[in-house]
Amino acid sequence: MRLRYKMIILLILAAVLPLLAVFISISAYAGRQRESLVNMKLNSVYGGAVGSYERMGKSILSQVGQLSEDQTLLRYLLIKGETGFIDQQGLIDMAVDMRRLLDLDYLFIIAPDGSTLARGHDPALFGDNLSSDPVFAEALKGQKVQSLARINDQGEDMLAVMALAPVWYENRELIGIVAGGNYLDEEFCRNLRDLSGAEILLLEGNTLLAKTIPGNPGEMSLYMPGTGPSGQDKQTFRTKLQGIWYTFSRYALNDYSGNRVADLLMGVSTQELDILFSNMKVIYGGFALGGLILAIIFGLLSSSGFTRPIENLTWAADRLASGDFSARVKSDGRGELTNLIDTFNEMAADLEDYRRKLLETERLAAFSTMARKVAHEIKNPLTPIRIAIEDLRRAYDSDDPKFAEAFRQSTETVLEEVQSLSKIVNEFSDFAKFPPPRLEPDDLNEIVRSTAPLFSTQIQDGVLKVDLDRKDLPVTADRDQLKRALVNLIKNALEAIPPTGEVRIKTLRTEKGAKVLIMDNGPGLAPSVKQNLF
């Protein structure tokens, strides 16, 4: 991975990690604050709702207790006890009036044997015996009772708060009981909501009896954690109704014996708080995103200024490694890397000078080797020339009649050997005049393509095969000298192979640049010949 990208990633991490840590901390803190606000509000409405419910029960018990001491009622019940007869219609009218006066949903007047004398909520129904009902049976023992009960009102079974009070004659004789109360229905829930400010749900087991939240009860899927059978402890849970999240507290509604009959759920909507805290997260997320973008921009700008000199140094070092000793790095004269760049340029200049001197040394060594070989090669034609001249001189001194023939042969020999000497001298001269390379950007495949037409016949005959890399191979080279070297190598390979031989030219990409291979299946070079290569 390039240094610039590493720096950008580090800068982004340096910017994002603190933002992420702060975001997580703020989210956790916001969650705790949200829960704290919800619980604070829930505690308030819970106290108000439970207090209202308990005050309602006490109020009903007080009203029923006062009614049990009413003198008119006492007179009706005494007459029945003494005569066995009762003013039924008068008692019923009294029950109806009292129910309305006390604002009760139902009112019973019961005889000591449990038979119903009058119903204030259903005047036409009387005479049935309620002594088998546990709540009424408890009151018939002379006890004041407050409980939840089931009341049949015109064929509909209703859950209600009930208070029962005995009617005593001179505090020693039970002559009847009075029972009354209010239904726990939609109206009860609405009144409780208005008093407490909480949404109210009334459940009996898993059945939703009444509610203040709009919607079809059948469409409400209420998740409620389990609880014990008769605990009054407040339990809090969170659930979703009609697409809105609520936090509820549960209050157990028990009968007179302490058994759980129903549950009163008081809840507050967390939608507004959820939206508020969600918006806070979005806003902070926007700031975090902005910080990330700024970090990326700053990283690009700062890393570019810092890493460009290093990248230039890397590029120049690669050029040096590939043999281009002219590579230099431009310095702007600022920053801590200036000294490094200057030192690198000085080192590159020293290497280039050293290479030049090395080439000169190698060239002198090559000249020395070449001179020895030229001297050796010159000796070969000089010997025939010397012999031809000596033969010609002997024929001339001896007046040999075949002098003309000897002269012709000797001159031909001298001319042939002189031509050989001239060829040797020209080759040495060409080597001495070998120009320095002119390195320019080029494509190795293109250089090989421009050389191939010189050997078109061999290519057509299948003796020479060219296999070029499919992609361009950019190089820095002297095209003319490289072509000259390729031509010489190809010619040598073609001359060295047997009649059925083959020469292949192949180009390929390498880690440091490009490579051209010239391969043949000839006999190769003898070890003694390899030593003379330079």
Image (spheres, grey):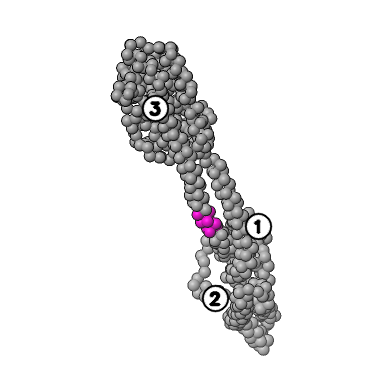
What residue is rendered at 68% in x and 71% in y? Answer: 438
Which mark lies nearer to you, 1 or 3? 3
Q: Which comes before the other along the chain, label 3 or label 2?
A: 3
The answer to if 20 sits in the magenta stretch is yes
What residue is rendered at 67% in x and 65% in y? Answer: 441
Q: Amino acid at mark 2?
A: Asn
> Which secondary structure, mark 1?
helix
> Which secondary structure, mark 2?
loop
Disc 2: which residue = 532
Q: Amino acid at mark 1?
A: Ser
Rendered location of residue 413, percent (x, y): 65, 78
Q: Which comes before the other along the chain, label 1 or label 3?
A: 3
Q: What whole-number distance in Å separates the C-alpha atoms at marks 1 and 2? A: 31 Å
Q: Which comes before the other along the chain, label 1 or label 2?
A: 1
Q: Amino acid at mark 3?
A: Gly
Above or below for 336 versus 196: below
**Is residue 268 at least partly visible in the picture?**
yes
Above or below for 303 versus 80: below
Rendered location of residue 456, percent (x, y): 65, 57
